[in-house]
Image (cartoon, helix red, strand yellow):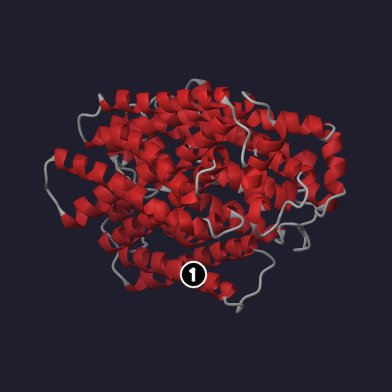
Amino acid sequence: MSGLRLDVDFVDYLILAIYFVFVLGVGFAARRAIRDSSDFFLSGRSMPAWVTGLAFVSANLGALEIIGMAANGAQYGMMTLHYYWVGAVPAMVFLGIVMMPFYYGSKVRSVPEFLRRRFNRPTHLFNAISFAVAQVLIAGVNLYALALILQALLGWPLWLSIVIGAAIVLSYITLGGLSSAIYNEVLQFFVILAGLLPITVIGLVKVGGWDGLVEKVRASDLGDAGLHTFSQTASTGNPLGANWIGIVFGLGFVLSFGYWTTNFAEVQRALSAKDMNAARRTPIIGAFPKLLIPAVTVLPGLIALVTVQGLGAEEGDLTYNNAIPLLMRDLLPNGVLGVAVTGLVASFMAGMAANVSGFNTVFTYDIWQSYLRKDRPDGYYLRVGRIATIVGVLVGIGTAFIAAGFDNIMNYIQALFSLFNAPLFATFIVGMFWKRMSAWAGFWSLLLGFLASLTLYLGYLGGVFAFNSDLEESFWGAGAAFLTAVVVAVVVTPFTPAKPEHELRGLVYGLAGPSTGADVIVAGDRVWWRNPVLLGGVALVLAVVLYVPFW
């Protein structure tokens, strides 16, 4: 990594040090407000919508977004925009308008707990364990990306950078719980933008503005196809190696909705909101900055493609994962470099904090309290949560070395989503709209959907199944998991007993309970700028309009 060593000076280090002081200060300040486990795991359900909305999108601005999307921008061009405009915003709007009334109204503390109420304990336990495993794997991705930056900044060995990065995140999550994570995520959102915007602006100036970038991309290996999103997706002859069916169904529906609507690391931010209306607006508020994030992720990837000679090597400093650090090295002067480094560090800390806070909540409530130590005092579970935080970070250190084996960590992340999130979304959505779906149908659809995706993935690795790219395999793996789960639900339900309707109130459509009635759902929605349906509609229209110049 010697070629990635950044030429930092005292000012750059000072900016980074000031940021760390603020982060730890937030942790100590949040600690004073923690009186019970609800304060630690759900911020006492007291957060305003604008705070939870920014935290919602900031929690996703981790390695997946910054390093992964810049790598994808360099490797696949403008087709990476699909991950935002069809692969995120519609699902975020759906979560806010349709699903949050059930999550928030049922007063569940986690997504696995919702599954226990809707289905049964085996479904609950399988989801709780699989979610916990997925979170420590994804935490490792964020930690690995953070370590890459610390390694480039300070020249430390990768293992030492991983350990130091983990210690920083561990400190403020253990101190202040979810409140510390959320307030830091709001801070990190602005720090991230301040750090990445100079890369885009200076990079565009270097390549001759937008017209210069377009000309240079056309002359690159991507060619003209690197400047379009849908126009060349009638077949798989495009940089992404996927046709529009895989993009719309696999990414836009199954992977996207599976991630945004059932991933507790995201939903947890909305559950911490102060009331139903704030909870519904949380993901929709987050959708608006999500529309524009490609300007500081995808564009730098394209700039790196046309300015960094040899980018895309499988090993060494020139892998796609290093697109952003390479631009920082080549483009930014001291001072601005410190802001950019701080922005990257902030993004990886935000992503890892979301994973760890989701892990400690599910482990404590859904595994430890539900199956190992019931009916203990609340203070006991608060202590367990802090210990789980430490354990989650330690395991994340180990999984960081797994992430280090992938030349494009986005491919690794998408493989995890197709395994864990796609079958969960199918089970979830069928069970929410079909009250007859039985408890055991929920378990078997979740399990067999997971196994269907795993079979496709292992077959692809073993050469049994052929796909044009790792990402295409993820799209089809997600589709296979979804369809398998739906078919299993339909087949198993007639042969197994249905749950009584009184146990399903507030958990399925058509059986609203007292906490999800219309009077609660529309409370506070009459002012137009607080209306989730109107705000969500505006976000969807903008997503379509933004596609037009890049069709």
Is residue 316 found left or right of 14 in the rendered image? right
Q: Is residue 82 visible?
A: no
Q: Residue furthest bottom?
A: 464
Q: Is residue 149 above or below residue 26?
A: below
Which residue is at a point 60% across and 45% down the rendered structure image? 67
Relative image position of residue 500 (x, y in whole percent) = 25, 58
Is residue 89 found left or right of 117 in the rendered image? right
Is residue 431 found left or right of 364 in the rendered image? right
Is residue 499 found left or right of 446 in the rendered image? left
Relative image position of residue 35 (x, y in whole percent) = 20, 29
Which residue is at a point 62% across and 63% down the rendered structure image? 470
Which residue is at a point 53% across and 31% down the rendered structure image? 342
Relative image position of residue 509 (x, y in whole percent) = 40, 48
In-front residue for pair 134/205: 205
Q: Amino acid at mark 1?
A: Leu
Pointer 1 residue: 454
For the image, the number of numbered tags is 1
Q: Is residue 502 above or below residue 442?
A: above
Q: Is residue 181 visible?
A: yes
Quadrant where the C terminus is found in the figure: top right
In-front residue for pair 430/172: 172
Q: Residue furthest top?
A: 527
In-front residue for pair 538/18: 18
Relative image position of residue 478 (x, y in whole percent) = 54, 62
